[in-house]
Image (cartoon, rainbow, N blue to C red):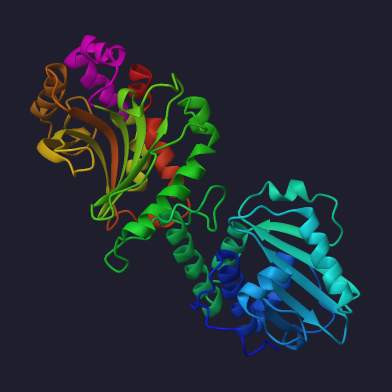
Amino acid sequence: MLRQTMRNVFDQYSQPENRLTHALLTALHEDRGLLALFLREIAGVKPPVAATHLSVLVQQLPETPPVSEEESERRGIPDGWVYSVEEEWCIVIESKVLIRLGADQIERHRRMAQRLGFTRVFVLAITTEEAARQRVEGEPRLKVLEWRKVYVWLRSHYGREWARRTAEYLEVAEARMIMDQQFVRGALTRFSGVPFSDDHPYTYLEAKRILRLLLDELRSRKDLRERLKIDPKAPGRGAITGSKGHIVWDFLSLRGDASKRFTSRPHLSLGIETRRLSVMVTIPDKVEGRVRRALREIGEDEFAALLARVVANLRPLLRAEPGAVPTFHAQQRRWRHRRAKADTDAELRFDLRTIPGAEGKPKKQPLWLSAAYGAFVNKRGSNYEFQIGVEFDYAKCAGLRKASATDLIAQVWLGCKPFVDLVR
């Protein structure tokens, strides 16, 4: 059984690996049905006795007095154990979050278990990076998997209290680590939807975590790479700031001159706001002259026709999510100093279906596009940028709360392809 040194799932060790292993093994100890599922579905092993007769331990050796976290680290004690002394059987669990997994550490843990008298030793390594598997290939009785897979597995058993609590703990832990800029590789969780609603209010930390996961998945999409020519290796914003603001945002780059700043090139923007998700193609105020000329030379009538094609491309998405709004958003801003919040001098936001020639119910009003397009053509040095895309209201778009929300986002950018082709 679990030793009395096991603490509450929300009680923190100092090391991330220890905190996460403690949370997971607490859940497995408290819910032995969940432990049986874990062994079968995650570890892929069949224990010699029922899960109710197994012992679960964190940060100490089986059948020995507990030691401090510092002493455990000094002695190289594995992060966790699931075992049966009578059957001489055990699973040694090693967790990696900020440090790489090495084959030598796996072998040390196996020898330690054998010295303790276990004759059947399995090792389960949980890491944040898939590449860890390649560094320990060929190790017998070893399974390596990512924390993200454990998270998805926990969510698949969300009806069980301890699975739900542990999945939610992983989300909180990941948000804090992103905030502290501790993550270099990998992730703890996987995107499972944008959860914000009246019952689940927006928070900066959670929005930042979700944004990171979203962009990781979007960078890997073949349709965006091949049809829009995004650059999946290009970095996004250097630092996601704005904890006191109403939006957390980042972007994907289009292939081109990687030496140029994103403020001079069109890019695909994704913003998680307090009340909505905005998926846009952005023309920044300092966009390079080539793009500015292309937009001027096309003329207002052809520009309107091009945007009408975008609306037509978005028709399937708008049928699936009637609460989504195809949007033109333009604004002129200025900053008092580099780190100051921008002052907005002017802003124009309208439904793209108001453009003559575009399909949809809103009443046609050509003046909105004339004002926005004219302000860009005649901007004369003002900090004027504009975006086209779709805004999804959390209260009206239930599809955002599913993992398939990545498909909605990709559909928006792919629907904007006629515009992207003009400005890329």
- Across and down, in percent, residue 14 comes to 53, 70
State the quadrant of the C terminus.
top left
In front: 232, or 243? 243
Q: Quadrant of residue 200?
A: bottom left
Considering the whole magenta stretch, tell me its main secondary structure: helix
The residue under the point 53% across, 58% down is 189
Whether 159 is among the magenta residues is: no
- Left or right: 389 as drawn, with respect to 12: left
- Left or right: 169 as drawn, with respect to 291: right
Whether 309 is among the magenta residues is: yes
- Left or right: 285 as drawn, with respect to 228: left
- Across and down, in percent, residue 90 comes to 81, 75
In front: 389, or 398? 389
State the quadrant of the N terminus.
bottom right
In this rendering, the answer to whether 36 lies above or below 186 is below
In front: 301, or 297? 297
The residue under the point 79% across, 60% down is 106
Q: Which contiguous range is marked in magenta? A: 285-310
Residue 78 visible (yes or no) = no
The residue under the point 79% across, 66% down is 109
